Image: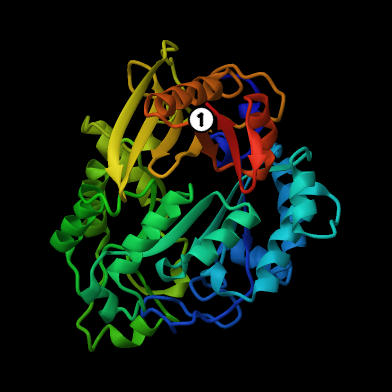
Amino acid sequence: MKQKINQIRKPVRTISGVTPLAVVIKPRKCNHGTCIYCPGGDVVPQSYTTKSPAIMRALNLAFDPYRQVKTRLDMLKTMGHPTGKIELIILGGTFMQYNLDYQYGFVKKCFDALNGKNSKNLAEAKKLNETAEHRCVAMCIENRPDNCSDKEIKRMLEMGTTRVEIGVQMPSDKIYQKIHRGHCVQDVIDATKRLKEAGFKLGYHIMPGLPGSNPRKDLKMFKEIFEKEEFRPDQLKLYPCQVVKTAPLAKLAKQMHYKPYTEKQTSEVLSKMYLEIPPYCRIMRVIREFPKETLVDGLTRLDLRKDIEIGLRNKKFKINEIRMREVGFNPKNLNQELKLNVLKYKASGGDEFFLEIVNKENILFGLLRLRLNKVAMIRELHVYGQALELGAKGKISQHKGLGKWLMEEAEKIAKQNKYKKIYVISGIGVREYYRKLGYKLEEPYMAKKL
């Protein structure tokens, strides 16, 4: 791998095959109030501090979505990253609680910035992006489990969303009451099913060390997330509880006799959690980016993930989690003899098929998530490796036909299970790719007769 990767600053940003671009929505209080661990700011979105990198950029640009996208695109280009395949990540809390005009206007302006042209409406902006220089190949929003109604899901799809992250923290009604979460475990179960049925890739935010829990309880609840078919997310963000100066918990900790986990406890708990994660799930992030000066108590090291993963590798533990198996994070002397594995599991009343292309060392080159229930739905297609510009030739995994291989296998499985048609939840900028494979647009999905 001697190509441009050596010329890219911070290559890890795009080593998973796409270029993430985060934008931040304007500050707004959550409808339910404030969770006790939440920074609860007035000048920035409620779950963030003014010192977080993405937030500082957004503050400087008055939370203007067009300027945020344009500025970030310019910065990524300067750093040498490809910008043809953008994953747009909308940060800032419960996006679906915002005014409808704001929601649609925000997303439209993001597309306008990617397209380099102002469109009359969102529909026109999306159409332009299908063949734009900077295509939105995936779009993620942060949401609450109690804001995933059928109407809200319809809106998410209309906007071009492909991935939804919900704050689960720990699935316990007792803990939810203690932390003023404002929803119940059943809301998590219902949202999980609706989101998967609609085709979204689903992420959970998990928070070990909350008031009312302990390491033993955390591990028990974490195991249940994968043991019980009503949960089973596709990805996780592991955010151990920290006491932020501006959070209600900063004042309540003493009377609640609360202490967050030490660095040693955090490392032990997270290491054990890694061992419970099945092959179909990816850890997106570990530890919130709260700078030391914003914290009263709790973990201050932002790079603990690296130590945890090195420790697990050194001890020769078998790790099934996706990110540690990705080709981009295992770049030396790779065996190029690839095979396709299919893992079938039950989730939220449907049959999930997790297709993965791996080598004999179980290094992951590409994956596909197929759900069979009311319809046959491809929820994700992803080929890993250093992101390339559109049309560029790949040397290891990207642009080598692995996506087509996965799609053909998914179509075979759907056909064998008597489905007459298969659907894909597609990022706007990937529609042209699916058209080449025989799919047609049936808003909001791409579809193909089998």
Is residue 202 at least partly visible in the picture? no
* Residue 413 % position (x, y): 40, 26
Classify the position of the N terminus by image quarter: top right
- Give the residue type that dot 1 points to: Tyr
* Residue 213 % position (x, y): 19, 69
* Residue 187 % position (x, y): 34, 68
Instruction: Name the one closer to the observer, 53 or 167.
Output: 167
Q: Residues within 10 Å of mark 1 (few under 14, many from 20)?
A: many
Task: Name the residue furthest top.
Answer: 337
Write the residue at 38% across / 78% down: 35
Is residue 128 at least partly visible in the picture? yes
* Numbered circles on residues, count: 1
The chosen color scheme is rainbow
Residue 17 quadrant? top right
Write the residue at 33% across / 19% down: 361
Residue assigned mark 1: 384
Residue 401 quadrant? top right
Residue 121 quadrant? bottom right
Task: Name the residue furthest left.
Answer: 216
* Residue 429 % position (x, y): 68, 40
Q: Is residue 203 left or right of residue 178?
A: right
Instruction: Name the one closer to the observer, 29 or 155.
Output: 155
Instruction: Name the one closer to the observer, 157 or 312.
Output: 157
Q: Is residue 300 above or below residue 198?
A: below
| SS for callout 1 | loop
Write the residue at 51% across / 33% down: 421
Write the residue at 37% across / 29% down: 417
Q: Is residue 82 above or below residue 36?
A: above
